[in-house]
Image (cartoon, rainbow, N blue to C red):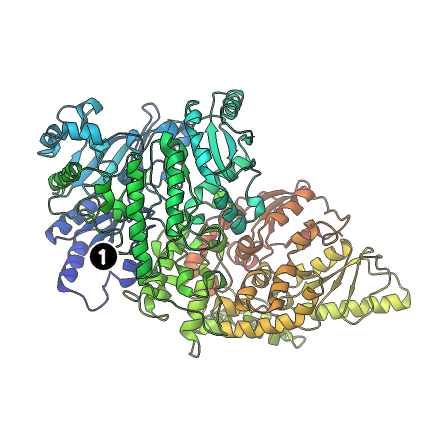
Amino acid sequence: MSTVSTNPPVAPELTDLVAALDRAIDGEVDASARRRSEYATDASNYRVPPQVVVFPRSTEDVLAILATASAHASPVTSRGGGTSVAGNAVGPGIVIDFSRHLNKILEIDPVARTARVQPGVVMSDLQAAAKPHGLRFGPDPSTQARATLAGMIGNNACGPHAVAYGRTVDNTIALDVVDGTGRRFTTSTGSGALDEIPGLADLVRSRLALIRTEFGRFGRQVSGYSLEHLLPEHGTDLAKFLVGTEGTLVTILEATVNLVPIPSSPVLVALGYPDMPAAADAVPAMLAHAPLAIEGLDAKLVDVVRAHKGADSVPELPPGAGWLLVEVGGETPDAALASAQAIVADSGTEAARIMPPGPDATAMWQIRADGAGLAGRTATGAQAWPGWEDAAVPPERLGTYLREFEALMDSYGVSGLPYGHFGDGCIHVRIDFPMTDEAGAAQFRSFMLDAARLVASHGGSLSGEHGDGRARGELLPLMYSAEAIAAFEAVKALFDPEDLLNPGVVVRPRAVDDDLRRPHARPLPMLSGSGFAFAHDDGDFTTAVHRCVGVGKCRADLTDAGSFMCPSYLATRDEKNSTRGRARVLQEMANGALVHGWDAPEVHDSLDLCLSCKACSSDCPAGVDMAQYKSEVLHRSYRGRVRPISHYALGWLPRWARLITSVPGVSRLVNAVLGVRPIAKLVLAGGGMDTRRRMVTFADEPLRRWWGRRARDRSRGARAGAARDTAAPTTGASSMPGQAPPSGITSGSTEVLLWADSFSEHLDTTGARAMVEVLEQAGYTVRMPEASACCGLTWISTGQLDGARARLRQTMDVLGPYAEAGIPIVGIEPSCTAVLRSDLPDLFPDDPRAAALAKGTYTLAELLTAPAPLGPADWAPPQLSGLQVIAQPHCHQHAVMGYEADLEVLRRAGAQVSTLGTCCGLAGNFGMEKGHYDVSVAVAEQALLPALREAPEGAVYLADGYSCRTQAQQLAGVTGMQLAQLLRRP
């Protein structure tokens, strides 16, 4: 039991409610402003701060929460992954988070093909548990890696494969629930099934004609209550009726669901059409082939993917501006291929490509899965919003509806990127409403009303799988008759007469423009000449943090798929430590109602366990960069003030390292002294670091001193006509600026500038020395700059942006002329290279040298794999066949440069590579700081430490990042190597 006190002033009734909950349950009760901020919104446009958030540990806890809520007349909203797009998972009273503890798969029956689950089970976890039995749950929404089963039941979620397997309602067998009166029951079917709710059978009998004519008209009619399931001809199925009621009638305690066989050898067919309506026109012909899925994809969305993730992220598509992605299966690969060819024959287009299972098909499905986040920005970069993101019409009406819908958007001067489940007639689109002020909110409301009239005219549904929530409840009278609306109210009165379960949704709904989040957030423009420019967000911090649209990919464990986001959430499973949770607190800071100011304790508590790994900047489909936001917050909070001691100890590490290594012999003395454990602990504690850590060691000879000595030795050897050093190459050479290069240089060899960052210069020079040799062996003339050039990384990560800018100005002075002259700059430390590629242009958006450096700086692997003349003409890596390599990409490299070039070099070398899919956990200063050690180790346990423990004899741990090597050495006693060391020929 853990209660976080509310922030004063507190109403007595709230204090009583929190105290009663705390007494009643074993789970956590949290009424802090920070927690309420995290749960004030879901994946929708709406902001409704709860009074308190609770995390039940058992079914008994849930029952106690509901009883306490009833006694205090407090509204209750059930929440799973918080990915509801219509505002179904926010509410004004108690929010129950089922995902934290009630997330167990209770039973899988492979014979009956059923599963029994707790409400907080994540969809992908159920899929993983069912897979060994050759089974899966049929519906698979794009958020399945974080959406919970109860949430899917609440909204009647579908996903692309509903064409083959049906909606969630079609796969729900029974529910264990509690209604608004406190009645607990397990649903049944047939005669007597409605007896659990007195009056429900009479309600149905008195409205048979209404229900038979207005409900269940087509598959994706999800809006309102699905009363058709209560009809005798449909089995009088109470469980199916409760699916899609959005937590307004019952709270789910357990669910029993159907499982279906996993299809074998699915084949994906991509079909190109002139536009999306034309693609939609072809859908009815496709349905005749009984496909597994039919998805629509707009060319504008594909362009956004290419802009966000690079051209290589999109497989080759057939010509067109709109595509159908049709998946077909078969008992054998040949049967699936024959079905695919039949689809092509009936498609009405010659633009077709068949993709068997493999990387291209996987990449296309990933684009579709990331659609909600990627579509959060239009092709022009404008913010786009949900609201009308889930309309559905009968598939035969889809093409006509899309043409009229596009005309409607044109009339309002707005645009969006349509995609969705074309096989079911369901369209997802986010629209660039000018939502930042009240005028924009008024336009949003007007558009929603017109769009609802349009979809109703086609016999469609306001919602096809997301539910109505706060976004569309007010619009239900435009779709249903007054008698149907009265029936909804009568049902609500039977199940929840006090209107405590998710009030304001479906029955007596809030207006579509009530509780909108964005119009109430005030601008937070950049500081003139200080801090980040936020150039992609109009120079406004508020716009930047509102990139987070709540899709919650940061809560998904996608490490096996190569996603690094979000290590702190995966280590703690606490919304506070997710990218989304932090963004919500920062959005509340912009709003100013719950969180007040840059230095608010809620802000700093939220950001404390952010590793600044930058993974979200690439893995979040909305492009959230929490590392940048954290740096800006620390900058504005502490500018001109005394900072935490670790900001000086670790933020100024390059300064201390330069001083210690500047005088020969001093570094050996310092290393010896700090090697005495009691002394090291005193220094660690005094510097704000965890005493379980070990101090870094400093280089005996800084890189530049070694470089100068090496150049002098080689120059003397050349003058004397002596043989070259046996370690020296014969195909390349090195030179100091202003010196004539040594003799023997290959004619036409290419110059490169090796940039020695502070870590490679003063702490660990081994990889940098190896890099010189590799570059020379590849035929390059290696130069080093005439002065040191620090990128300011540690100043950036601790939010000392004035100091970072000062160092980067010097770096531009030193490195800029080389970049402008077209000489490639090769970085050694990945995180420092990432600064020049990413942070530098945003800190100096108007300095052409920043753009030149960002464009002209490369990793070693990028250079070696580039086409000539940038890359080497005839270099080949040494053969590493049989060598087992455990590769740890640095998070910043993953986010900014990518690791593909490194993997390509290793592939050419013949190494057997196992790539770790998440952060090492040290993350620069983060893992060293006091209070972070346990989370740092927990992050390392996600991938790094298990991989090192299970590594075969002779395996090499490959890590270019200094932090990654330090973490492995300190936690596992494993010494890492850098890529250059592997590639250096003897």
- Which percent across, then down, holds residue 894? 54, 52
- Residue at 25% of width from left, 37% of height from top? 254
- Residue at 81% of width from left, 68% of height from top? 713
Q: Is residue 435 left or right of residue 214?
A: right
Considering depth in this image, is 373 or 919 the residue closer to the camera?
373
Identify the element where label 1 is drawn.
strand
Residue identifier under label 1: 52
Give the number of marks. 1
Considering depth in this image, is 677 or 557 the residue closer to the camera?
557
Considering depth in this image, is 323 or 773 the residue closer to the camera?
323
Classed neighbour count for the residue bearing mark 1: other residues with Cα under 10 Å, few (<14), some (14–19), many (≥20): many
- Which percent across, then down, holds residue 746? 84, 57
Residue 890 drawn above or below residue 361? below
- Which percent across, then down, holds residue 396? 37, 29
Q: Amino acid at mark 1?
A: Val
Q: Is residue 155 left or right of residue 699?
A: left
Is there any visible trace of residue 702 in the rendered image?
no
- Which percent across, then down, holds residue 359? 55, 37
Q: Quadrant of residue 106?
A: top left
Q: Quadrant of residue 480?
A: top left
- The image quadrant where one finds the N terminus is bottom left
Considering depth in this image, is 169 or 827 the residue closer to the camera?
169
Residue 210 drawn above or below residue 793? above
Is there any visible trace of residue 671 in the rendered image?
yes
- Residue at 53% of width from left, 65% of height from top? 842
Q: Is residue 125 left or right of residue 907?
A: left
